[in-house]
Amino acid sequence: MARPPDATATAIRGALARGEIAAALAAADRWRHAAPDAAEAFFLAGLATAMLGKVSGGIALIEQAAARDGRGEYHAQLARLYTLVRRDDAAAHALAKAETARPPDALGRDTMGCVYARLGDHAASLPHFAAAVRLEPTNAAFRYNLAAALSFVGRQAEAEDALEALIARAPGDARAHHLLAGLRRQTPERHHVDRLTAAHAAATAPRDRLLLGYALAKELDDLADPHAAFAMLAQANAEHRATLPYRFADDEAVFDAIEACWAAPAARATSDPPGAAPIFVVGMPRTGTTLVDRILSSHPDVESAGELQALPLAVKTAAGTRGRRVLDPDTIRAAAHADAGAIGRDYLARSAPHVPGRRPRFVDKFPGNFLYLGLIARALPEAAIVCLRRDPLDTVLANFRNLFAIGSRYYDYSYDLLDTAAYYQRFDRLMAIWRAALPGRVLELGYEALVDDQAGQTRGLLDHCGLSWSDACLDFQANAAPVATPSAAQVRRPLYRDAVGRWRRHADALEPARAFLRQHGIPVD
């Protein structure tokens, strides 16, 4: 006797949960061929196909499932898969459909929350993460996602409570410890150093040791023990750096190709460019880009789109190169001959799902766009460009002591002090090239100058961006928009001087980086 459809679905879902993906796919394929109208068969076949790495094939199957049955689970998973292939506009449409028939299960609601978060709408993610925790309170991943979303929207006390509840259930959860350490400045009365020390000593997984090492270093630094903090940071970075295949020569090859291919035509006119005027805030990470984004998005005519990958992806598409890295020398050489106007239009289309559209202008604050300034100038001639500059040694230290997205290859330099100093040197050299190629086009805004003269520097910033004066820009800490970067806690405070000259607390440890910068003609105190 044939197995009833519900039993078949249960069996296939069980196989997927156990990691028996090929067997699950074979069973789902048999089912959908035997019952071509069975939406669940197409859905499960699509999930299995995507889990085997064939994401586009999985999407096609789940689209067929959704056409047969508009179940919210189908649209939620479609939205997730669309984000994996960078089809953010399609993901937003799938989410809207999922909202009309919300999945009844915890995983479906968490999936919706994750997609909203990837699209930068952290406020919309919150109710879904909260629902997932209510439906499955023992799931640590769901609890973590809820806590992270709470922190992004500025509900720090609730985020702290959520993380403490998670750690009570899962004392070794390294992600929870790391997020908790960054929520606020720790004090002698309220800190987690002893608990973190024990968790770090017990951790064996490399990723856990990295997260816990960073958390412990951050709290020790908060408690005014800079030497112990730096020692822990250096240990954590060295352990992780040893696992990476990174060579600075690979980044150097990218800089060399940009200088050779993109600098000369930077000021060349483009035929039929789009007339949109986004604002690009770029620079080395941890130099004040989030702060300037908050200042600008406090203006009534400006909203923040967050850190977009829209421009790198538009350039990669225009280049037509097949390498796994978004930016490599082959892509740079090919993009030099691409239609700059088409790159600008593709950028705007990719940005659209991340821009609320309630205000005339938007900010893209992906710091790494400093690599693309020559193309930005041609592809979007009406765009405003602001590059943050900060004391070289403070920049090196800030990059070395911040844990960026672990899986991202953009930041592999940051686990070694000399690699970071070398990266800064090439950034500084490239900015000099853009300065010469694009006179007056890029506002280089000093972080220290902004701290010392907030009103004057803000006025110059707004003038450069073609914006009228707004007092709200001086009160940026009142900006209620979510922040999903390591600067979330800092930018909810008024301007402060704590980070100016921070490198001096670690002067001895930074001496090799200081000597390197001096050797390459970069002034350091």
Image (tube, rainbow, N blue to C red):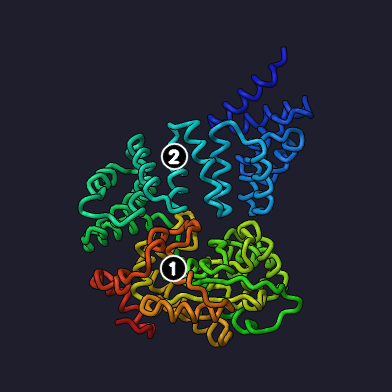
Left or right: residue 5 compared with residue 219: right
Residue 510 marker:
none
Left or right: residue 346 compared with residue 323: right
Three-letter amino acid code at disc 1?
Asp
Q: Is the Cβ of the residue at disc 2 closer than 8 Å to that at disc 1? A: no
Residue 475 marker:
1
**Quick one: 132 or 63, which is closer to the camera?**
132
Residue 32 placed where, x, y %? 74, 29
Residue 224 placed where, x, y %? 22, 61
Secondary structure at badge 2 equals: helix
Q: Is residue 248 visible?
A: no
Of the residues under marks 2 and 1, which one precedes in the sequence? 2
**Quick one: 220 or 21, which is closer to the camera?**
220
Residue 158 placed where, x, y %? 39, 45
Q: Which residue sits at x=35%, y=34%?
A: 169
Q: Which residue sits at x=40%, y=46%?
A: 159
Q: How dense is the environment of label 2, judged by Cα within 10 Å: few (below 14), some, or many (20 and up)?
A: many
Q: CA distance from mark 2 to mark 1?
A: 33 Å
- Residue that protrudes farthest toward the top in the picture: 1
Q: How dense is the environment of label 1, judged by Cα within 10 Å: few (below 14), some, or many (20 and up)?
A: some
In the rendered view, tell whether residue 503 sits above or below residue 102.
Answer: below
Q: Which residue sits at x=30%, y=74%?
A: 501
In the rendered view, tell whether residue 339 sits above or below residue 220.
Answer: below
Three-letter amino acid code at disc 2?
Arg
Q: Is residue 458 visible?
A: yes
The quadrant in which residue 500 appears is bottom left
Q: Residue tagged by mark 2?
A: 143
Q: Nearer the viewer, mark 2 or mark 1?
A: 1
Please state, as top left, top right, bottom left or bottom right, where the N terminus lies in the image: top right
